[in-house]
Image (cartoon, rainbow, N blue to C red):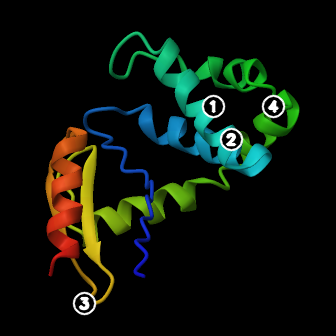
Amino acid sequence: MSFLHVVWVYRHFPIASLHPKAQKEAEATECAFKLAGNDGFWAFTDKIFEVTPSNNGLDPNILPDLASQIGLDISDFQKCLDSGEMAKVVEDGIQSGIRAQVQGTPASFVTNIKTGKFKEVQGGAVPYTTLKQAIETTLAK
Protein backbone atom coordinates (compact mmCIF):
# COMPACT_ATOMS: atom_id res chain seq x y z
CA MET A 1 0.00 0.00 0.00
CA SER A 2 1.25 3.46 -0.92
CA PHE A 3 0.71 6.55 1.12
CA LEU A 4 0.46 10.07 -0.12
CA HIS A 5 1.94 12.80 2.02
CA VAL A 6 0.80 16.31 1.37
CA VAL A 7 2.46 19.20 3.13
CA TRP A 8 1.13 22.70 2.81
CA VAL A 9 3.69 25.37 3.65
CA TYR A 10 2.75 28.99 4.16
CA ARG A 11 5.42 31.58 3.61
CA HIS A 12 5.10 35.32 3.77
CA PHE A 13 5.79 37.35 0.65
CA PRO A 14 4.75 40.92 1.41
CA ILE A 15 5.20 43.19 -1.58
CA ALA A 16 6.13 46.53 -0.04
CA SER A 17 5.57 48.54 -3.22
CA LEU A 18 1.93 47.41 -3.31
CA HIS A 19 1.17 46.90 0.37
CA PRO A 20 3.53 48.85 2.65
CA LYS A 21 1.70 47.63 5.78
CA ALA A 22 1.98 43.94 4.87
CA GLN A 23 5.41 43.47 6.45
CA LYS A 24 4.19 44.45 9.93
CA GLU A 25 0.98 42.45 9.46
CA ALA A 26 3.10 39.39 8.55
CA GLU A 27 5.27 39.94 11.63
CA ALA A 28 2.10 40.17 13.72
CA THR A 29 0.89 36.79 12.44
CA GLU A 30 4.25 35.29 13.42
CA CYS A 31 3.90 36.79 16.90
CA ALA A 32 0.49 35.12 17.10
CA PHE A 33 2.18 31.85 16.10
CA LYS A 34 4.85 32.33 18.75
CA LEU A 35 2.23 32.89 21.44
CA ALA A 36 -0.42 30.37 20.39
CA GLY A 37 0.96 28.04 17.71
CA ASN A 38 -0.80 27.21 14.47
CA ASP A 39 -4.25 27.91 15.91
CA GLY A 40 -3.14 31.39 16.96
CA PHE A 41 -1.52 32.06 13.59
CA TRP A 42 -4.64 31.12 11.62
CA ALA A 43 -7.07 32.81 14.01
CA PHE A 44 -5.07 36.03 13.75
CA THR A 45 -4.75 35.73 9.96
CA ASP A 46 -8.49 35.15 9.66
CA LYS A 47 -9.14 38.16 11.89
CA ILE A 48 -6.95 40.39 9.70
CA PHE A 49 -8.87 39.36 6.58
CA GLU A 50 -12.17 39.79 8.41
CA VAL A 51 -11.56 43.41 9.42
CA THR A 52 -9.37 44.77 6.63
CA PRO A 53 -11.50 47.10 4.49
CA SER A 54 -9.32 46.75 1.36
CA ASN A 55 -5.75 46.17 0.28
CA ASN A 56 -3.47 48.10 2.59
CA GLY A 57 -6.47 49.46 4.48
CA LEU A 58 -5.77 48.03 7.93
CA ASP A 59 -4.59 50.49 10.56
CA PRO A 60 -1.50 48.82 12.09
CA ASN A 61 -2.34 50.38 15.46
CA ILE A 62 -5.21 47.91 15.86
CA LEU A 63 -3.02 44.79 15.55
CA PRO A 64 -2.75 44.38 19.36
CA ASP A 65 -6.53 44.75 19.69
CA LEU A 66 -7.01 42.02 17.09
CA ALA A 67 -4.61 39.82 19.06
CA SER A 68 -6.68 40.43 22.18
CA GLN A 69 -9.88 39.55 20.30
CA ILE A 70 -8.55 36.08 19.53
CA GLY A 71 -7.44 35.51 23.11
CA LEU A 72 -3.76 36.43 23.01
CA ASP A 73 -2.13 38.30 25.87
CA ILE A 74 -1.95 41.86 24.55
CA SER A 75 1.20 42.71 26.51
CA ASP A 76 3.12 39.66 25.25
CA PHE A 77 1.89 40.31 21.72
CA GLN A 78 2.91 43.97 21.79
CA LYS A 79 6.33 43.07 23.18
CA CYS A 80 6.89 40.58 20.37
CA LEU A 81 5.66 42.99 17.70
CA ASP A 82 7.70 45.93 18.99
CA SER A 83 10.87 43.84 19.27
CA GLY A 84 11.04 43.22 15.54
CA GLU A 85 12.10 39.64 16.26
CA MET A 86 9.75 38.26 13.62
CA ALA A 87 11.17 40.44 10.83
CA LYS A 88 13.75 37.72 10.07
CA VAL A 89 11.05 35.04 9.82
CA VAL A 90 9.19 37.18 7.28
CA GLU A 91 12.41 38.02 5.42
CA ASP A 92 13.26 34.31 5.20
CA GLY A 93 9.88 33.75 3.53
CA ILE A 94 10.56 36.56 1.08
CA GLN A 95 13.98 35.14 0.18
CA SER A 96 12.48 31.68 -0.27
CA GLY A 97 9.92 33.17 -2.64
CA ILE A 98 12.60 35.01 -4.59
CA ARG A 99 14.57 31.78 -5.01
CA ALA A 100 11.39 30.09 -6.26
CA GLN A 101 10.80 33.02 -8.64
CA VAL A 102 7.49 34.01 -7.07
CA GLN A 103 6.05 36.96 -8.95
CA GLY A 104 3.00 37.66 -6.81
CA THR A 105 0.72 36.32 -4.16
CA PRO A 106 -0.63 33.88 -3.58
CA ALA A 107 1.66 31.42 -5.35
CA SER A 108 1.22 27.65 -5.31
CA PHE A 109 3.89 25.08 -6.09
CA VAL A 110 3.82 21.30 -6.28
CA THR A 111 7.01 19.37 -5.55
CA ASN A 112 7.87 15.81 -6.46
CA ILE A 113 9.80 14.65 -3.40
CA LYS A 114 11.39 11.80 -5.34
CA THR A 115 13.05 14.14 -7.82
CA GLY A 116 13.11 17.34 -5.75
CA LYS A 117 11.75 19.23 -8.73
CA PHE A 118 8.99 21.74 -8.25
CA LYS A 119 6.82 23.79 -10.51
CA GLU A 120 4.42 26.63 -9.98
CA VAL A 121 0.81 25.59 -10.44
CA GLN A 122 -0.14 29.01 -11.79
CA GLY A 123 0.10 32.52 -10.45
CA GLY A 124 -2.55 33.84 -8.10
CA ALA A 125 -5.30 32.02 -6.28
CA VAL A 126 -6.17 28.69 -7.84
CA PRO A 127 -9.35 26.66 -7.62
CA TYR A 128 -9.23 23.34 -5.80
CA THR A 129 -9.63 21.41 -9.07
CA THR A 130 -6.52 23.06 -10.57
CA LEU A 131 -4.42 22.27 -7.50
CA LYS A 132 -5.76 18.71 -7.36
CA GLN A 133 -4.88 18.14 -11.02
CA ALA A 134 -1.35 19.52 -10.49
CA ILE A 135 -0.82 17.15 -7.55
CA GLU A 136 -2.13 14.16 -9.50
CA THR A 137 0.06 15.00 -12.49
CA THR A 138 3.11 15.31 -10.25
CA LEU A 139 2.37 11.98 -8.55
CA ALA A 140 2.07 10.24 -11.92
CA LYS A 141 5.68 11.10 -12.80
Q: Do the residues labelled 1 and 2 touch (CB within 8 Å)?
A: yes
Count of residue discs: 4
Could you give the CA–CA distance between mark 4 and mark 1, rounded to whole angstroms? Answer: 10 Å
Q: What residue type is labelled 1?
A: Ala
Residue 94 image offset from top left, x and y in percent: 37, 59
Quadrant in the rendering for residue 28: top right
> Do residues under tags 4 and 3 come within 8 Å of each other at their CB atoms?
no
User: What residue is rendered at 59% in x and 37% in y?
Assistant: 42
Q: Give the numbered dot on residue 115.
A: 3
Q: Quick one: label 1, few (<14), some, or many (20+) residues within 10 Å?
A: some
Q: Mark 1 points at which residue?
A: 43
Which amino acid type is shown beneath numbered disc 4? Leu
In this orientation, which residue lies closer to the viewer: 75 or 47? Answer: 47
Q: Residue beneath label 2, please?
A: 39
Asked which secondary structure carries label 1, the reply is helix
Q: Which residue is drawn at 85% across and 39% down?
A: 76
